Amino acid sequence: MSIHRRDLLVKGAAGGAALLAAGAAASAAPRTHSPAARPRPPAGPGKHVPVPLPFKASSLTGISERMIKSHHDKNYAGAVKNLNAVENDLADLKPGAPGYLVAGLRERELLFANSVVLHEHYFGNLGGRGKRTGALDQRLGADFGASAWEAAFHASGAALGGGSGWVVLAFSLHDGSLRIAQSINHTQALALGAPLLVLDMYEHAYAIDYGADHASYIDAFFENIAWEIVEERYHRAHRAFAALG
Ligand SMILES: [Fe+2]
């Protein structure tokens, strides 16, 4: 559902008190998650380094330490390594390089760059207790229905079970709407969509713990969402949308 920018700002203001209250409650409760990572300056081509897990690997419910460490240390770190390699290869291209070579490297660059971004958001929104409060909760209820959005998000993940891809709750910086988008093979994404909540549906994210039972993995994912982080992303996207005018 698209909404008018002014309506969004009014809604945002109305939700501000709830957001502050939720933030106070979150800060009063013990937590296992590090604060949300702030945007970092670009590392530069070929110089990216993996971001550590923002929570203790053994602290998740229903997602084992072995599973999350394998995912982080092998799959995510591998994407960072490959992004560096392809960026270096692009930098080494000679003038007049064949178009197929340039196109192939650019396609891989996009794939690995998106993989890095999505993985960092995925790990960043885990490590919590799955309790949803605050302005985003109110907005999801208003836009989708109190529980309907969660069912839609879950179904979008289940639809990718046995395959590969991502489910992203995104804030559109184009029109201020919230959208549930699927990203297949890392390269499909909502244009101008700021990721708020990211679910990895590649089998490497759950096969060690659940085999082909992707539905149970999605249930575990919801139990571990750090909603205070997702809420902060929403707040940040809200400010960016307002600033873009
Ligand atoms: Fe992954």
Image: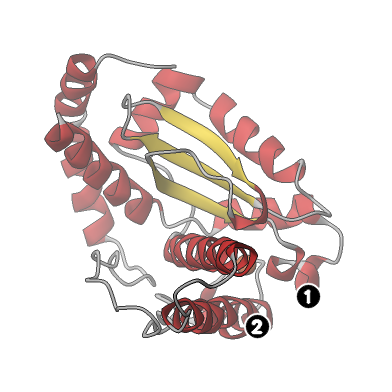
Q: Residue 133 is drawn in which quadrant?
A: top left
Under circle 2, the secondary element is helix
Q: Can the viewer see residue 185 in this picture?
A: yes
Foreground of the two, 239 or 62: 239
Q: Is residue 165 above or below residue 168?
A: below
- Pointer 1 and pointer 2: residues touching (CB < 8 Å)? yes
Tell me residue 171's x, y (percent): 37, 36
Q: How crowded is mark 1: few (under 14 residues within 10 Å), some or many (20 or more)?
A: some
Name which residue type carries label 1: Ile
The foreground one among 32 and 86 is: 86
What residue lies at 73% left-to-right and 66% top-to-bottom?
A: 206
**Left-right relation of 27 to 51:** left
Q: Is mark 2 within 8 Å of ligand 1?
A: no
Q: On the image, which quarter does residue 136 sit in?
A: top left
Image location of residue 85, percent across then percent down:
52, 84
Above or below for 127 versus 216: below
Quadrant for residue 67, please give it: bottom right
* Closest to the observer, 36 or 167: 167
The C terminus, quarter of image: top left
Q: Which residue is drawn at 59% across and 62% down?
A: 99
Considering the image in quadrants, where does the N terminus appear?
top left
Q: In this view, does 220 lie above or below 44?
A: above
Q: Which residue bears the numbered disc 1?
A: 208
Horizontal side of 78 relative to 144 (left or right) equals right
Q: Which residue is drawn at 61% across and 70% down?
A: 101
Tell me if I can see residue 145 in this picture.
no
Q: Which amino acid does label 2 sit on?
A: Ser
Identify the secondary structure beneath mark 1.
Answer: helix
